């Protein structure tokens, strides 16, 4: 029987469906030595963001040769040393379609929250303060949204931006074809200089410098907003705080962080930053779709192993 470890959890209906199909599902979380021990006994490992599948863990799994597949329940695979895993006979897959709408909606929610002070006025009102005159916000209508990275999630954000009357410009490493005529492709520097709102939709590449750091903050428009619901590490958070403190940026919104759980008090307590604890894919609908994709991946993969 194929044994599956869902180390960061899996939707209950998906686990049940896998069991009906004849797979054994271990829906528990293991860390440290416990994870190193059980990884030798499973054929498939399912993770989300919490579990890091690095070279050491892959080496341990490779001692038995039992682990054949690692699935990231989400869009990226930043927390998996994918190339090394493949070199050791372990396939790596993810679920790129499942959470696009959920992350796009959270991105837009953060844009509204930070531009209209929803994030901080909610806090001060609960503290007994009535600071109505303090929170003069900014409309999204008529503003330019710059999307860095133009994959599935960014395109969902772009659709919503157009509905709000925003102008959409975007940058990607490779200029995509068959793009809606209402979106304009520009180079990265032009985007950073022209956008009123900049939303990131790129992976964090291990060993690469921050995609947004001191240089980028310096050329942003005065009173621009930065949104990151993509990956922690693509924004230099120390430089972000400086840009907010010196009045260069009007605000920022973060769902992902360089270190998770978030420990940096300068970020956590900053009144100009709207924060959520990495909940981009945390909707019932997204989790159901992730479960369905995982079932499909596992069923197809192990049927071809026979």
Image (cartoon, rainbow, N blue to C red):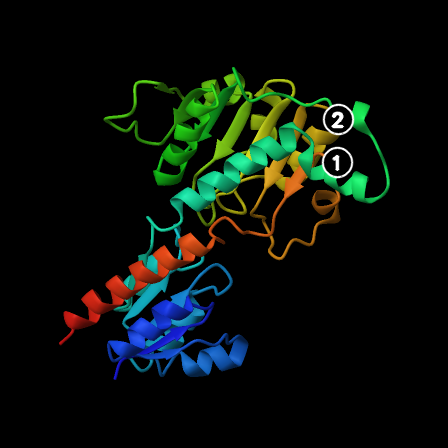
Mark drawn on residue 135: 2
Image vertical order of residue 222 relative to residue 149, above or below:
above
- Depth order, front residue of 233/296: 296
- Give the percent coordinates (x, y) of residue 157: 43, 33
Is 44 left or right of 9, judged from the image as shown? left
- Depth order, front residue of 202/24: 24
Image vertical order of residue 195 relative to residue 121, above or below:
above
Q: Quadrant of the C terminus?
A: bottom left
Is 20 left or right of 193, judged from the image as shown? left
- Depth order, front residue of 130/237: 130
Q: Please report the residue visible at 68 percent of the width from the left and 35 percent of the height from the top.
A: 118
- Give the percent coordinates (x, y) of residue 266: 74, 44
Is 6 left or right of 264, judged from the image as shown? left
* C-beta proximity under 8 Å, tags 1 and 2: yes
Q: Please indicate, yes or no, whether residue 189 appears anywhere in the rendered image.
A: yes
- Give the percent coordinates (x, y) of residue 265: 74, 48
Q: Please indicate, yes or no, whether residue 210 appears anywhere in the rendered image.
A: no
Q: Quadrant for residue 72, please give it.
A: bottom left
Q: Quadrant for residue 128, please give it.
A: top right
Q: Please report the residue visible at 24 percent of the width from the left and 27 percent of the height from the top.
A: 177
Q: Which residue is mark 1?
A: 121
Q: Quick one: SS at disc 2?
A: loop
Q: Quick one: SS at disc 1?
A: helix
Q: Quadrant for residue 123, please give it.
A: top right
Mark drawn on residue 291: none
Return the disc, 1 or 2, that comes first in the chain's sequence.
1
Is disc 2 surrounded by few (<14), some (14 to 19) or many (20+) residues within 10 Å? few
- Give how far apart the Cα atoms at labels 1 and 2 are: 7 Å
- Give the percent coordinates (x, y) of residue 214: 61, 30
Q: Please report the residue visible at 25 percent of the width from the left and 84 percent of the height from the top.
A: 1
């Amino acid at each position: 029987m194929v044994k599956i470890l869902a180390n960061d959890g899996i939707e209950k209906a998906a686990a049940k469906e896998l069991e009906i199909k004849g797979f054994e599902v271990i829906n528990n979380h293991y860390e440290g030595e416990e994870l190193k021990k059980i990884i030798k006994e499973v054929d498939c490992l399912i993770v989300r963001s919490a579990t890091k599948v690095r070279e050491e863990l892959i080496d341990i799994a490779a001692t038995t040769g039992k682990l054949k597949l690692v699935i990231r329940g989400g869009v990226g695979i930043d927390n998996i040393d994918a190339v090394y895993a493949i070199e050791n006979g372990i396939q790596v897959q993810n679920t790129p379609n499942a959470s696009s709408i959920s992350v796009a909606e959270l991105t837009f929610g953060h844009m509204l929250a930070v531009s209209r002070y929803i994030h901080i006025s909610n806090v001060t009102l609960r503290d007994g303060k009535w600071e109505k005159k303090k929170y003069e916000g900014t409309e999204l209508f008529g503003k330019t949204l710059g999307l860095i990275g133009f994959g599935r999630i960014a395109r969902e954000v772009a659709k919503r931006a157009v509905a709000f009357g925003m102008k959409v410009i975007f940058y990607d490493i490779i200029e995509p074809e068959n793009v809606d005529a209402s979106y304009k492709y520009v180079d990265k520097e032009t985007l950073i200089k022209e956008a009123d709102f900049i939303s990131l939709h790129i992976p964090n590449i291990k060993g690469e410098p921050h995609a947004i750091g001191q240089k980028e903050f310096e050329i942003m428009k005065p009173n621009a907003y930065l949104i990151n619901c993509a990956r922690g590490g693509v924004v230099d958070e120390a430089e972000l705080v400086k840009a907010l403190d010196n009045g260069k940026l009007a605000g920022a919104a973060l769902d992902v962080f360089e270190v998770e759980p978030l420990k940096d008090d300068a970020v956590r307590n900053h009144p100009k930053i709207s924060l959520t604890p990495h909940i981009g894919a945390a909707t019932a609908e997204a989790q159901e779709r992730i479960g369905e994709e995982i079932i499909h991946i596992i069923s197809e993969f192990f049927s071809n192993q026979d």
